[in-house]
Image: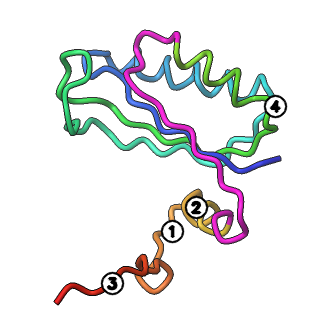
Amino acid sequence: MKHYEVLFILKPTLTEEEVNANLEFVKGVLTKNGAELETIVPMGTRKLAYKIKKYERGTYFVIYFKAPTILIAELERVLRITEELMRFLIVKYESKKEIMAWEKLSRGIKQSKKEIKPLDSPEIQ
């Protein structure tokens, strides 16, 4: 099983019950297709960088999970046709370093600045 995260943004006009129903729907799609849910991180309602479908805000969620590769196509298909969902992003963690980062993120541990190495770029003088 591979390590993944899915971030999705729901419309801000949804009631709390509708938000919870959509979250349960996404969780259901994942578990029915063989995923092991690790952590669900509700990030709350935030301002978007730009308007999406005339909305300036959105309710964010991140789900960390392990799943077979076949699940991703089905998850993408279902998320694309869900009307209450404005955007989504699925990230796959492959290398050992990425998987270690996934494990820390799924437990809610933030990475220290020592662990995050800057890109090698020439200094501007």
Label 2, label 1: how many angstroms apart (C-alpha)?
Answer: 6 Å
Label 2, label 3: how many angstroms apart (C-alpha)?
Answer: 35 Å
Label disc, if present, on residue 73 of the rendered structure: none
Label 3, label 1: how many angstroms apart (C-alpha)?
Answer: 31 Å
Percent across and percent down for residue 5 are: 59, 45
Above or below: residue 74 compared with residue 91? above
> Residue type at mark 4?
Gly
Name the residue tied to disc 1.
109
Name the residue tied to disc 4.
34
Task: Mark 1 or mark 4: name the one nearer the start of the chain.
Answer: 4
Percent across and percent down for residue 62 are: 49, 42
Label disc, if present, on residue 122 of the rendered structure: 3
The quarter holding residue 103 reads bottom right
Q: Residues at badges 3 and 4 in contact (C-beta under 8 Å)?
A: no
Name the residue tied to disc 2.
107
* Label 4 Cα crowd, 10 Å radius (few <14 / some 14-19 / many 20+): some
For mark 2, give the secondary structure.
Answer: loop
